[in-house]
């Protein structure tokens, strides 16, 4: 899965992750400050519905590795939507069958209601 994932992402330096212990972590994009919505990770049906919307391009990937961020990335290429759905965490909280790694999505919003769909790699 990880080899495939590397082929589907490109760096997105226009997004910046800022750890903020007082008010919660933030993602900054073009002067907008996004914070994680309170609804937790999204179930697969919700993610599938969002990914069907052609306006949801690109989806962002935010990876944590042992507590450190490894950067923001865009998904790119024709196969990323099917890759996300095939590797998305099951609604029972377990990885897809045959895998020990999965993707988890969270909504992040800014004060005006703009939304980012942020994926984390869950190992």
Image: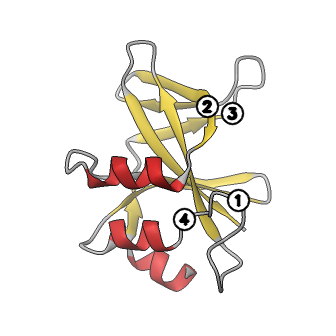
Q: Is residue 54 above or below residue 93?
A: above
- Badge 1 or badge 3: first in the primary sequence: 3
Q: Quadrant of residue 35?
A: top right
Nearer to me, 108 or 95:
95
- Badge 3 or badge 4: first in the primary sequence: 3
Q: Residues within 10 Å of mark 3 (few under 14, many from 20)?
A: few
Q: Position of residue 5 (x, y in %)?
A: 48, 75
- Badge 2 or badge 3: first in the primary sequence: 3
Q: Is residue 15 above or below residue 58?
A: above
Q: Residue at x 56, y 80 (%)?
A: 2
Q: Is residue 30 above or below residue 73?
A: above
Q: Is residue 26 left or right of residue 94?
A: left
**Mark 4 vs 2: CB contact within 8 A:** no
Residue that label 3 marks: 19
Q: Residue at x 70, y 25 (%)?
A: 24
Nearer to me, 121 or 89:
89
**Mark 2 vs 1: CB contact within 8 A:** no
**Mark 3 vs 4: CB contact within 8 A:** no
Q: Position of residue 79 (x, y in %)?
A: 30, 75
- Helix, strand or loop at disc 4? loop
Separation of disc 1 and disc 3 at Cα? 29 Å
Separation of disc 2 and disc 3 at Cα? 20 Å
Residue that label 2 marks: 39
Residue that label 4 marks: 88
Residue that label 1 marks: 92
Q: Residue at x 30, y 65 (%)?
A: 76
């Amino acid at each position: 899965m990880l080899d495939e994932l590397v082929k589907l992402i490109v760096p997105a330096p226009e997004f910046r992750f800022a750890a903020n212990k007082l008010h919660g972590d933030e993602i900054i994009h073009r002067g907008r400050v996004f914070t994680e919505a309170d609804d937790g990770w999204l179930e697969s049906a919700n993610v599938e519905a969002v990914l069907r919307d052609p306006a949801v391009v690109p989806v962002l990937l935010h990876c944590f590795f042992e507590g450190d961020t490894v950067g923001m990335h865009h998904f790119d290429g024709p196969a990323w939507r099917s890759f996300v759905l095939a590797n998305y965490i099951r609604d029972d909280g377990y990885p897809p069958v045959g895998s020990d790694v999965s993707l988890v999505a969270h909504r992040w919003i800014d004060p005006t209601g703009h939304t980012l769909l942020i994926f984390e790699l869950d190992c």
